[in-house]
Amino acid sequence: MAYDQSVTHVPRGSGASVGISLETKARICRYAIIAAVIVAWEIVPQLGLVPRLFLPSLSSTLAMLMAHSGDFAVQMLVTLQEVGMALVFACGFGILFGLWVGSTLTVRKALLPVVSALFAVPLVVLYPLFTAWFGIGSASKVVFASVYGLLPTVLGTAAGAQTIDRQLTQAARSMGATRLQQILWVTLPASVPTVLASFRLGGALVIVGVVVAEMMMSSAGIGFLLSKYRTQLNSSGVFAAIILILALAIGFDLAVQAIERRWTGGVRNKAARRPADAP
């Protein structure tokens, strides 16, 4: 059957049209905002629109960071060590405990309301108790940050464990798997996306907990350095410390995002290969 080829056309604005993708536009917009903030940070103090005591220029902040790089590096290393130790407990123990709570009905009904109530308590007001119990040093900061990040990790992981198909755990139990084996080999792999989201939130709060503890009552760490420069009215030093804290938080978040993408990509690849491997 003959047909008129002149009527076949691609509408304007359709998906077949060539242009900048939405993801590329979002990336350009994001970088443009970052560049605008950097430029404004340098120009606004230089023009005297904001007193330098409140907002030092970016160049003076970076100069402060370079001039005292050794001191910043030493204090940052202290903070990294404390964050690392707190992460092991808050996220390591928190994930396992959350999986156990979420996958056990009796334990979930007994403990989950308690954990939720504790999460609503502003733990910052309890930090003097941690210093009284563990002293003014790394121990009190690590314990405080561990508890600060533990509660949301447990809540998020337990919520994810509740969504797992019970037939999976029943099948593992029928094959003789112990309770720990069920949690490690069935519950954990099935709830990885939720676990990573909980790890992301708990880790961020661990960083917050360590820095806040260093600012309140400590003699070392990047938070201590920030508080020191604040009392000296050294705004360049304060903003230099803030830059390092932001770098630490953003670096942790990007690392967790990379793990999430790697896991998601691996799952998709396995799902794509499965039909080809099937007989």
Image (tube, rainbow, N blue to C red):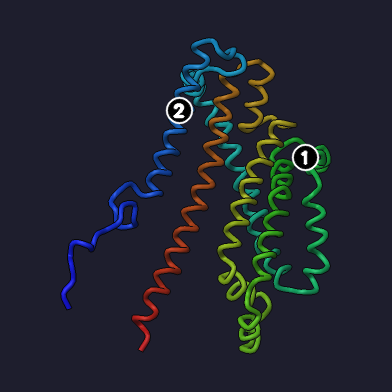
Residue 200 appears left or right of 140: left
Residue 132 visible within the image: no
Query: Dividing the picture into quarters, in which one does residue 93 lie?
Result: bottom right
> Which mark is drawn over residue 36?
2
Q: Nearer the viewer, residue 7 or 172?
A: 7
Query: Dividing the picture into quarters, in which one does residue 132 lie?
Result: top right
Amino acid at circle 1: Val
Q: Nearer the viewer, residue 242 or 90?
A: 242
Instruction: Look at discs 1 and 2 and give the one toward the viewer.
Output: 2
Look at 42% across and 36% down and name the residue there: 31
Look at 49% across and 50% down and name the residue there: 255
The image shows residue 199 at horizontal and vertical percentages of: 60, 55
Asked if residue 182 is positioned above or below residue 19 in the image, the reply reads: below
- Looking at this view, name the residue that lies furthest to the top: 48
Amino acid at circle 2: Ala
Asked if residue 205 is positioned above or below residue 89 in the image, the reply reads: above
Q: Residues within 10 Å of mark 2 (few under 14, many from 20)?
A: few
The image shows residue 78 at horizontal and vertical percentages of: 60, 37
Q: Residues within 10 Å of mark 1 (few under 14, many from 20)?
A: some
Query: Dividing the picture into quarters, in which one does residue 179 lie?
Result: bottom right
Residue 158 appears left or right of 65: right
The image shows residue 13 at horizontal and vertical percentages of: 34, 52
Locate the N terminus by quadrant.
bottom left
Closer to the chain start, of discs 1 and 2, is: 2
Residue 54 appears left or right of 277: right
> Which mark is drawn over residue 124?
1
Locate the C terminus by quadrant.
bottom left
Asked if residue 26 is positioned above or below residue 177 in the image, the reply reads: above
- CA gap between label 1 and label 2 equals 35 Å
Kind of element beneath mark 2? helix
